[in-house]
Amino acid sequence: MDRRAYLATVGAAVTAAVAGCPDGGLSESEFDVGMSANAFLPDTYEVDIGDTVVWGNNGSRGHTVTAYDGGIPADAAFFASGGYDDTAAARDAWANGGGGTIRAGETYEHTFDTPGDHRYFCIPHERDGMTGVVAVKE
Ligand SMILES: [Cu+2]
């Protein structure tokens, strides 16, 4: 094995270990905000109006991306993996069969058209502090 091939192999192994998905999940270039065991990384993500944010589950557990009804600007569109209309509907769907789950290796995306902070969380890991903010610049 030549040196370059060896380094490429080591690099891939390290990436897989960090992502917690040794059987080949998403690469970092496929998403903006990652989902580890119980955190959004980074937990605060800044974008411009009109930008689309892609979340990627590069861990091994299922997660959701669910906006807080009262945590987004008044005129902003609600967003939640699974496409629910509000936080209560998303919680309900998750409790009854895991609706809205983003499984390991899957992505979810939303386009932000309203300036301001958009607070969201992961339903199964909210108690572990799995929350995040998309800050849309004016
Ligand atoms: Cu989670």
Image: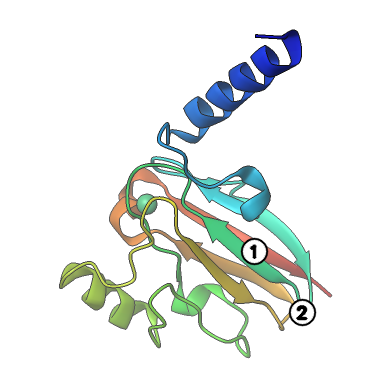
**Residue at point 46% right, 51% down?**
57
Image quadrant holding the C terminus, namely bottom right
The quadrant where residue 11 appears? top right
**Along the line of sight, the residue nearer the viewer: 10 or 128:** 10
- Residue at the left extreme, as displayed: 96
The answer to whether residue 118 is left or right of residue 45 is left
Which residue is depicted at the point 43% across and 33% down? 20
Q: Residue 93 appears at what percent x and percent y?
A: 24, 76
* Horizontal side of residue 2 vs 100, given as left or right: right
**10 Å crowding of disc 2: few (<14), some (14-19), many (20+):** few
Q: Is residue 14 above or below residue 1?
A: below
- Residue 3 picture location, percent across and down: 73, 9
Q: Please name the residue that numbered disc 1 is placed on.
A: 134
In 3D space, how far apart are the residues under numbered discs 1 and 2 (Cα atoms)? 12 Å
Indicate whether 84 appears above or below 110: below
Q: Which mark is residue 55?
A: none
State the residue in front, 60 or 79: 60
Tell whether circle 2 marks a residue whose Cβ is less than 8 angstroms from ligand 1. no
Instruction: Looking at this view, name the residue that lies furthest to the right.
Output: 138
Residue 102 in the figure: left or right of residue 45: left
- Circle 2 is placed at which residue position? 50
Q: Position of residue 35 (x, y in %)?
A: 48, 48
Q: Secondary structure at mark 2?
A: loop
Q: Of the residues shown, which amino acid type is indicated by label 2?
A: Gly
Looking at the image, tell me whether mark 1 or mark 2 is earlier in sequence order.
2
**Viewer-nearest of labels 1 and 2?**
2
Point out residue 59 in the picture as x, y percentages from the top left corner. 42, 42
Q: Quadrant of the N terminus?
A: top right
The residue at 57%/87% (across/down) is 77
